[in-house]
Amino acid sequence: MGIFNFFKNQFIEVIEWQNQDANTLVYQFPVHNNEIKMGAELTVRESQVAIMVNEGELADVFGPGRHILYTQNMPILTKLKSWKYGFDSPFKAEVYFINTKQFIDQKWGTSNPIMMRDQDFGMIRLRGYGIYSYRVSDPVVFLRELFGTNSSYDTNSVEGHLKKMIISGLSDLFAESQIPALDLAMHYDELSVQGKQKMSPKFASFGFEITGLYIENLSLPKEVEEAMDKRTTMGVLGNMQQYQQYQAAEAIRDIAKNDSGGGLAGAGMGMGAGVSMGQVMANAMNPNNQPAQPAAPTKSCPHCQATLNTDAKFCGQCGKSAETEKVPCISCQAPLPKDAKFCSICGTAQIKEKICPKCSHANLPNAKFCADCGETLDVK
């Protein structure tokens, strides 16, 4: 009787996963050589899914709740093992619990800078980082595509692959958005939403659902940030002439308040500083010291070669039209000077059409045979 009780106790009667680790995606219930008693109790908690596996082949899937294992609620396993209806003997099967809760605060970041073309700074290198969250939405796909039948599987096992997928997708998104580097910060929310939508199909192919993706920071190289700081400083200064006048006035006020130098020496220093500041003040106040403006662009009259402003329509010397007559290229229709012999865009020779001597059909300049009658167009 004691030996019978010993073997009876080897049958598993309760199957559940209680100590659910925070980062564990899959937990294999330790069946090993023991057998599961027909009529055993399977408890699946919220944010869990249990899957029966028979000799490496997926069988029945159980959602949250309390399940009594009979042939009636294990139709796939019953079919795989060819059980008869009412089968009541213990059986062997692998039981896997899938964690379907959200895994939040998963970090992503660029290990190498993303090369981008910016309309203000040209080619730039962009770095960024943020967080994302996901969960197992299709346990069957997840088991087939990623997990297989390993004894354990956690977020560290898939973290590297998911992070690389996100970086690849966001790099493509940033380049396609064509948002200037100066305006990136005001588009974090929009880019985060678009990034989540872009990554959803890729996550779904592994049985995952990406529940959130957030961009925390996008940073530019140090040289670009310094250039941006200089541009900001110039914008704050505004009119440089007024700024110089303000600096000169502040310096004179500081000298007037400085009475630390005594006697003739102090007076001499004050006079010297006064003369110097007078010169600075004169230079600052003199409007003639404004930086030289660049010369306005000019053009030549096509008739008498007189120098004219670029917006001049008539020549002040000969009175003729200053605009060169344009004709379209016979090949690409680009505007060309009337007497141009070749197109500056496509290189086509600008000669007249070839008229067929037999049927008078107008052909392209480079035609060798008539397109209408086939007569040769080459002049012997």
Image: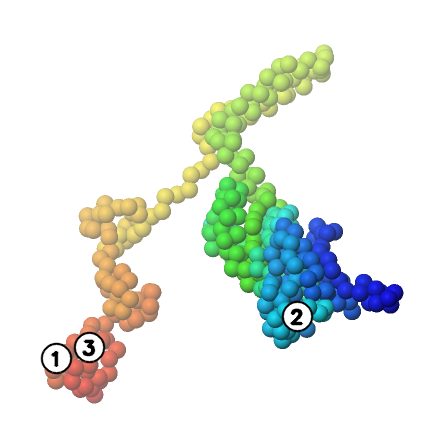
Instruction: Provide residue 271's location: percent of width, then percent of height.
Output: 63, 17
Is the residue marked by circle 3 packed among few (<14), some (14-19), or many (20+) residues within 10 Å? some
Local SS, label 1: loop
**Is any part of residue 182 visible from this angle?**
no
**Which of 260/219 is in front?**
219
Disc 3 is placed on an element classified as strand
Which label was assigned to residue 360? 1
Give percent across and percent down for residue 260: 71, 15
Name the mark nearer the viewer: 1 or 2: 2
- Amino acid at pointer 2: Phe
Write the residue at 73% across / 65% down: 36
> Label 2 crowding class (10 Å Cα cut-off): few <14, some 14-19, many 20+?
some
Kindly give the residue lying farthest to the left in the view shown. Answer: 359
Question: Horizontal and vertical percent for residue 270?
Answer: 65, 17
* Amino acid beneath label 3: Asn
Dot 2 corresponds to which residue? 87
Depth-wise, is mark 3 or mark 2 nearer the camera? 2
Q: Image quarter for residue 228?
A: top right
